[in-house]
Amino acid sequence: MISRIFRSVFFMTILTLILGLGLSVFISSYLSLKQDSEKLRHYTQQLAHVLNESDAPDLRLLDTDIYRINIINSDGDVLYDSHMREETLENHSKRIEFIQAKQYGHSEVHRYSTTLGKRTVYYALKLADGRVLRASFTSDSIISLTRSLILHILLVFTLAVIVSVFLAKKLSASIVKPINNLNLNNPEENDCYDELKPLLNRIAEHQKRIKKLLRKVTASHVQLKTLTTRLSEGIVLLNKKGEILLLNNSAKAIFSKNTDDNGLIGKPLVFLSQNSVICSVYEKRSQLEFHKQNIELNGKYFSLIFNKIEDDSKLLGYVLLLVDITKERELQLQRQEFAANVSHELKTPLQSIIGRAELIENGIVKKDDLPVFGARIKHEGQTLLSMINDIMFLSRVESGVKAKKEKFNIRSVADTVVENLNEKALSKKITVLVNCPDNVIYFTKRYFYEILNNLIDNAIKYNKEEGRVDCTITVERDNIFIKVSDTGIGIPYEDSTRIFERFFTVDRSHSNRDSTGLGLTIVKHIVQECNGQIKVDSKLGEGTSFSLNLHI
C-alpha cells in the first residue's frame, strides 16, 4: 500500500510540476508579449502624432534598435524602412496590417516563423495624409524560449524530482501509519480518517457476527466433546477420506492410545488398530452403509458399529461406535455355566430321592428302616428346596431390580439368625457369639438376613468340633460393618480366589454334603448391590474371617 501511495504522490507531483512549468512559460510568454505589444502601440501612436503634426520630418530620427519602422504610401510602396533599403522591399499592399489600417485606421498582426522559431508583432496606423505607419518587433516564440531555458528547466525538474521522492516517502508513510496502527479488535475505538469510519463500522459489524457464530460453533464443539468424553462407549468420527476427526477418551482407552488429540487427528483409522475386522471395515468403508460385528480388542469384547454420515446423498464422513460387551459376554458364559452347574447340583439330590422312593415302592426297604429312608428323603428335599430358593434369590439380586428398604432392628434380625442356626451349632458343640447394637436402621431386611445367615452358617459348617464363631456388627453413619470369624478348617490359598463362585465348596467332606455352594455368591452380589466391600482373611487349619461393610 505504501508503494502505491508513493507512486501516486510522486507521479502526481511530477505531473503537476510539468504542467506548472509549462503553464509558467506560457503565462510568462503571454504577459511579455502583451506588455511588449502595449509598448509598441504606445510608441507607434506617439510617432504617428509627431508625423501628423510635422510637415517634413527628418525620417532619420525614426531609426531605433528596438522597433522596425516603415512608412508605406497608399499604393503599398515602402517609402521608408529603418532597417533596410526601401528599394529592396516588395510592395506591401497585400499585407494584412496594411489593408486593415487603410480600412479601419489601425491594425495589429502577429506572425510566427516555425523555421526560425520567432514571433513578429506588427502595429499599423493610418496617417492624416493617407500613408500608413507600421512598427514591429521580433521576439522568441514559446518553443524557442523553452529551448533557451532547457538547462534551467532540467535543473529545476531534477531538484523537483528529488524533493518529490522525499516528500512522497514522508507523505505515504504518514498516510499509512494511522492505518497500520488500527486496532481491528475494537474497530469502533480507532481515531482515524473519517473516510475509513464506514469501513471500520462494517468490520466491527462483521466481527460481531463472526464472534457470535464462533461462540455457537465453540459451544457446539464443547458440547459435542463433553458428551462424547463422558460416554463409556468409544466413538471415532472420520472424514470422507477415512481420517480421524474426533475420538473420545473411551476410544483412546480401548485402543490403548495415550497421546493427545493432535497426535491422532488426521491419521487414518487403521492407525488406531491393526485388527483384521477394523482394517476390513476401513478398506470397504465406501461400500458399507451399515456394519455391525463383535470383535475382541486387548482382551475385551466389543460390539463394533460402523455407519456412513450423509446429507442429501452427499457423503460427509463416517462414525465408528464401540460398545463394551465384555460383561454381557461374561454373564452369558456364567449363565451357561450356571445352567450346567444347576443341572448337576439338582441331579444329585433328585437321584437320591428317586432311588430311595423306588426302594420303598418295590417293598425292598424293611418296615423298621422306613423312618430312616423318610428322613433322608426329607433331608434331600429340604436341600433341594434350599438350593432352589438360593437360586431364585440370586437371580433376583443379579437382575438389578432394587430391593425394597424398610426400618428394622438389626439386633432382632441377628438373634433370629442365631436362633435358626442354633440346632446346627449345638450338633457340633460350636459356640456362636454375636456383638450387635440395638439399633433401628433403614435398609433391605432380606439382604441383611441373608448375609448374616450365610456367613454364620458357613462358619458353623466349616468349623471344628467345639469351635467358636464370633460376629461383630457396628453402625457408623451410613455404613454397616460386619465381621464373622471362626476357628474352622480355613481356606487353602489356591481356593481363596474361587470361594465366591457358584456351587464352589472348599471341602464337601466337611459339610456333610448339605451345602448348596451359593451362600458366598449371594453375599458377594448383595455387597456389590450396596456399593460395599468384602475382605477375606484365612489361615489353613486355624480359621477364617470375613469383614465387610455395606452402604445403607
Image (cartoon, rainbow, N blue to C red):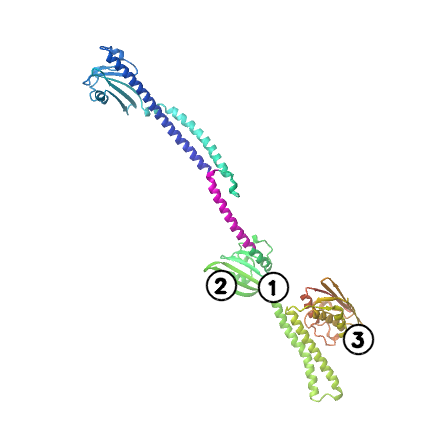
Q: Residue furthest left?
A: 75
Instruction: Tell me the tag on residue 300.
Output: 1
Comes first in the chain, label 1 or label 2 = 2
**Along the line of sight, which residue is nearer the eye, 387 or 493?**
387
Crowding at label 2, few (<14), some or many (≥20) Cα neighbours within 10 Å?
A: few
- Please, is residue 40 above or below residue 354 in the view? above
Report x, y in % for residue 72: 21, 17
Instruction: Determine the CA span between mark 1 and mark 2.
Output: 26 Å
Vertical relation: 262 (above or below) 539? above
Mark 2 sits on what residue? Answer: 289
State which region is magenta: 193-222
- Return the x and y of residue 130 as percentages of the image width and height: 20, 16
Sequence-earlier tag: 1 or 3: 1
Which amino acid type is marked by label 1?
Lys
Where residue 235 sits, quadrant-wise, is bottom right
Q: Nearer the viewer, residue 35 or 513?
A: 35
435 vs 142, left or right, is right
Give amino acid for label 2: Glu
Q: Which residue is mark 3?
A: 426
